[in-house]
Amino acid sequence: MTDLLTPVLSKNWTQERSWKIANYERTGGYQGLKKALKTSPSDVISVVKDSGLRGRGGAGFPTGMKWSFVPQDNPNPKYLVVNADESEPGTCKDMPLLMASPHTLVEGVIISSYAIGCAYAFIYVRGEVAHVIRRLQQAVREAYSAGYAGKNILGSGYDLEIVVHAGAGAYICGEETALLDSLEGRRGQPRLRPPFPAVAGLYASPTVVNNVETISSVPSIIREGASWFSSMGSEKSKGYTLYSLSGHVARPGQFEAPLGITLRQLLELSGGVREGHELKFWTPGGSSTPILTPADIDLPLDYEGMAGAGSMLGTKALQIFDETTSVVRTTLRWVEFYKHESCGKCTPCREGTWWLVQLLRDFEAGKASEGDIEKMLDLCDNIGGKSFCALADGAVACVTSAVKHFRSEFEQGYHTPAWELFPYGRSALFAKQSEGAHA
Amino acid sequence: MSGHEFQSFFPESGSIDYADTASSITDATVEEMRQIAARYPEPRSALLPMLHLVQSVDGRISPRGIEVCADVLGITTAQVAGVATFYTMYVRKPGGKHHVGVCTTALCAVMGGDILLDEVSEKLGVGEGETTPDGMFTLERIECNAACDYAPVMMVDWEFMDNMDPVKASAMIDDLAAGRPVQSTRGPVLTGWRNTERLLAGFPDGRADEGPSAGPASLLGLQIAEERGWQAPTPGEIAAPVKEENQ
Amino acid sequence: MSVEAKAGDVVASDLISVFIDDTEVKVPKGTLVIRAAEMIGVDIPRFCDHPLLDPVGACRECMVEVPDMGNGRGMPKPQASCTLECAPGMQVKTQVSSEKADKAQRGILELLLINHPLDCPICDKGGECPLQNQAMSHGRGTSRYEGVKRTFPKPVSVSAQILLDRERCVLCARCTRFSEQISGDPFIALVERGALQQVGFYEDHPYDSYFSGNVIQICPVGALTSADYRFQARPFDLVSTTTTCEGCASGCELRTDHRHFQVKRRLAGNKPEVNEEWNCDLGRFGFYSGRQDDRITAPLVRENGELRVASWPEAIDAAVTGLKAAGSSVGVLTGGRLTLENAYGYSKFARTVLGTNNIDFRSRQASDEEAQFLGSSVAGKRLGEGVTFADLQSASSVICVAFEPEEESAIVFLRLRKGVRKNKLTVHSVAPYLSNGFAKLNANLIAAVPGTEASVISTLDADADTVILVGERAAGLPGAFSALADLTERTGARVAWIPRRAGDRGALEAGCLPGLLPGGRPVADAAARVDLAAAWGAEVPSAPGLTGAQILAATAAGELNALVVAGFQPTDFADAQTTRDGIEKAGFVISLESRQSEVTERADVVFPVDLIEEQAGTFWNWEHRPGRVNRVIKRVPSPMTDVRVLAMLADALGEDLGFRVPAGARAEFDELGAWEGARVAAPAVAAGGLPDVAFPTSLVLASWRLLLGGSASTDGATALLETAKPDVARLSPATAAALGVGAGEPLTVTARGGATTLPLVIEDSMVDGVVWIPGNRHGAGLGELDVVAGETVEVNGGAA
């Protein structure tokens, strides 16, 4: 029986100056790379395939399979692009990983690039995290100095350039094709698929786009073996992963555990919902994953478990809201986020989020009209599955799941403002200084 | 009551501020832009970092900045403008010395972000998107910044200011205004937004080793595991932590 | 719809079967579902989709259900049919058979309308608006939207010609995709994001593109309008006529709309073989020249040195008197703007009525070598016997000699660009520098100092997949045509001559050359003369005629007594002053014109002819393709054409021209057919060399006319001219440095006829020792300087 928590990625975070290459090396760092360079690229892909590693950015696509889609007979250069644009509301796992141990990613980048035959790798980090970028830039420089990157890596004859690229503020760039457009110096708007990035991605060349946590998991898999990795987790969701607990919990934070842990177990570890309060609703993997209720806290937090509950594992960003929280207000704020972050390319997302926000404001202010719930749900039906990418689906998921579980709260929006039903000050950790409780 | 009123008329949208033609871009800036372009297999990839560099020099996306980027990359000014107006980190009016962001996406908002934004706004005497008359602070409502386990979160000069409340925010603003050193909870001593923009353009500032490896929330699971002796199965040979000499 | 989307071009074995609303459709592999649906008459609503633009899938209006992708599995969500390729056995359910698809389409349409203003009654697009139409056919009758609409200050001038009403925009990105993909002028781009996304531009760089008007035409709403047409008419009040553009030799099909006998606008016609669905701004907006104050509406005769209005019989009498006095000592200058029918009228009039071969359409620099090339390689050919637009797209390489496609035949440029984008076409330019137009074609510059092109051509490599496009300017490059004839002979490459003016190709075929009779019959060939004489029932003069320049020199020298002149300007010629002198000193001048000009000022009798929009006829384009010119304005039952005037003159001279209206001329011309005997021999002229230059103050001149510049044809097109390129001079960096002149500083170019001062642009690709200036500066042609490309000019910094 595996332990409840299994720190691998986070294992060295308490080390003194864990972000420095020397300290990373002293805790086993770059052993995976050395091992990988002694095997063939296709063997590296096989190990990753065998490990059962699936994408940790939300979609859960098998990583080894994604790599094997790269056509090696394509004459164009191959590219690896790491998606470090962590922006999904509630998601906060990649940034601490990069800040504490950027070399875990850098080592993963080098091994993964070697596996897919890539000579130019990019790490696309959201721009709003200066210190993460500093640590990452330094780690890449250190890797070059140590001979892990650049020409003829460790005498293997393998060359790799690594560029740390800062974004500039756009949630949509977490969508892999929007990210590629952004990395090409364009507006970060999603591209048509097909062609898929594996065939025609960055500069129309074969490209693998993977999440930070996915690539960071590669060194340990190579070091310890595929069966070691797959000994953790559940049947179809293998390995360890980072769960992020935030919101109305006694102690929010990061928990690295095998896939399949439950919210009940995580809450127990973190001291439960904040004192004197109880769980009302939660997201399993960021705001784009339909909300769940206390009834779901014993479900395994893995790809299948969450899909079975009508939600998604997503980024394993567990946002916890207690009984003081207005579902209507929270839904509105999420949809406002999607409206703000809609790239504008397609009609349903651009116009639909614009309309949804206005409808939800009416609900929040107690000014919605009889029938507005049905109208809103029909609008969601007209948006969901019709948009160019999944951003609008996320916006719709907030609304439909909220109505599904808390319809009566929306009905109250026909006559009573949400702030009267759920005085907002009660949800906050502090009161407004000047006027006391927020109306 | 969600904090921001629903705006439907956009008189100023669609362009940068052409009226303000001031620019401090020099030949050296252009040379640095060419350096950025040289990092990429195709130069246009350099556009985002180049625009960060424009902001570090001009304090905003200036008309000259757009023209120079277009010239260096061989694309049209309209194409540069399309990119510069797409991303929220690019600003059209000169920013203050410190960029003060308050997260009000759902979770932070509920946890107190809305209150915090009101308080900071009152404290600074400016609204969202505005800069204090002394040019010290620009206040902005920001979206989720990937630090939800530290909610409510503020970002100052795009450095983490975790677990904020009105009292801490007020003290921080007083310190910054008085020129006293303020350190990010997970990052370096704040030196100003333009320095951050230069960092984002890919020019390191030598401050990577400041600040902790992680905040307490990031370490919570690890500490519990260590307390209880939990670990991944058959761990590899991992050496004991070694204290490193100062570099 | 583009030609290549037609199934007919594909062999049956390449076709795959898909089922749309249970109807089987066979389509070529790669066909989009929305196109396949069109083939069986299912009209899926759409906004962003355009068959000539790359698919984008942005508006999401064209959603369909796909219960089976052809592999037994269905798509879980509705799909945008404009981005979905047909797969063998695929089942598609459109709004016709699927409630889901219908609801998806209605849902998107509702979303498109929530922020759309209800200003259809004052919108130019109202009545021909795809949004309006599809809201009626695929929308719901009422709106459920009760929120606030997005508003912007309106409108924005994207250029002097094009205005943008952002509120009306549905962000289909057709305009921005057109500007980037088709014309390569991305001066408009999507800016901002989300609900604020809009079409934008950079204030100091307006959307000045030669093709900008197309974005108005493809805009599916009224967001883009032209300054010219805005608020001018309602679409349903307009009368539309399909015709052929007179702007250049590309021969674009146009749709010309008029109201109350006035042309209100011109749109690109849909002619997949030629202009697809595009045209240039000159063709679209350059139709005001005929409404100027100088329009001639009655005959004029000179009396006591002054021109006065006369009656038609009076004017014809005067003309007959003059012509009778001159006998066959007459020259006929037709210019390049005539329809084939009118040109044929002059050609036959000269031979059978005047009895001379003194006729030339080339109101520009010309050479005997050129005439020989035209006689041997161009005249007498029919569509299909030479290069076509489609050939440009499918060639492996195209070499342009003395030809700037974007400036001199803009639709050729678009087709070359399509070939480059879609078919890996490589374009080469033999020129002194790589112009912006060629840069947009990723062209390879084969640098040549003007005048040395012939030697460069003789070193070129080519093969049967190579097409060579040679412009009319090659007439000024000694040996160039000869070298081309040799190159094609040597390599199997094909060559096409692309003149600038719409009437040139037809005039050549009509026999408006001193050595060439209609249908490519050589004057020097007795059999050809006999053939023609038999058809005409009249003698065909055998004495070789004079060229245009020789005619003018002869009149100036008193060796030729009279001139019959159709529309041209003296400044069109290499030497404007000599041309003026030639007309001035001719004993008797008849001018057939629509507007007062330097020719009419010097004429003895002026006959008013109607504008092209009032005439019917044919323009042959450079492919030898006849393009129908239809009467747009039918104010009078029978318009006054050149043919009609010439027939009256013939009558009065006691001769019978054989036809009185263009249709008669066309019938006779068609009856004649092309000459099947021996053609004129190919030219063999030695390559020209470098003139003597005293670097850097004496430089070789390079020059060509820009699409928009000084030209009588664009008079009155105010907004159009504001989008023209500024007049500049160009030098290489080394030459500029040697002269000590910096970018933007004034540079003075001096030649025999005068001097001009223009701001300098430094061209990195320019060969050293050459200065370029436009051939049609605003207000003055190159002819005013009495110099041609390849000659030397004095150059110095500063003003003259």
Image (tube, rainbow, N blue to C red):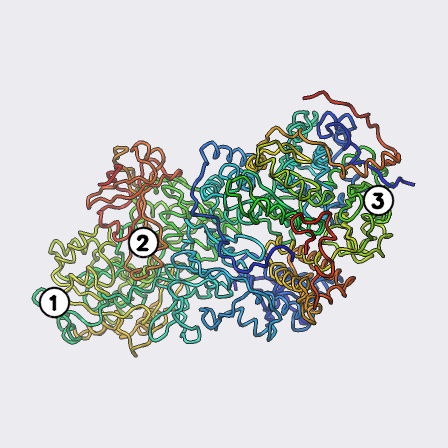
User: Foreground: A362 or C478?
Assistant: A362
Residues at badges 2 and 1 in contact (C-beta under 8 Å)? no
What residue is drawn where x is 16% and y is 58%?
C583
Nearer to me, B135 or C133: B135
Asked whether the residues under the numbered discs 2 and 3 touch, taking CB atoms below 8 Å apart as contact, a structural biologist would say: no
**Alpha carbon separation for disc pair 1 and 3:** 109 Å
Q: Is residue C111 above or below residue A221?
A: below
**Kind of residue sitting beneath label 1:** Arg
From the viewer's perspective, is the residue at label 2 or at label 3 nearer? 3
In x, y percent, where is residue A131? Answer: 65, 35
In the rendered image, which residue does mark 2 sit on?
A: C709
Q: Residues within 10 Å of mark 1 (few under 14, many from 20)?
A: some
In this view, B156 is above or below A322:
above
Alpha carbon separation for disc pair 2 and 1? 33 Å
Q: Chain of mark 3?
A: A
- Residues indicated by labels 1 and 3 sit on the same polypeptide chain: no
Question: What residue type is disc 3 on?
Answer: Gly
Which marked residue is nearer to the observer: mark 1 or mark 3?
3
- Residue C584 image point, x, y percent: 14, 58
Residue topped by disc 3: A271
Whether residue C346 is visible here, answered yes or no, is yes
Q: A367 or C772: which is nearer to us?
A: A367
Position of B44 with respect to A109 (left or right) is: left
Pick whichever of labels 2 and 1 is earlier in the sequence. 1
Mark 1 lies on residue: C302
Residue C273 can be seen, yes or no: no
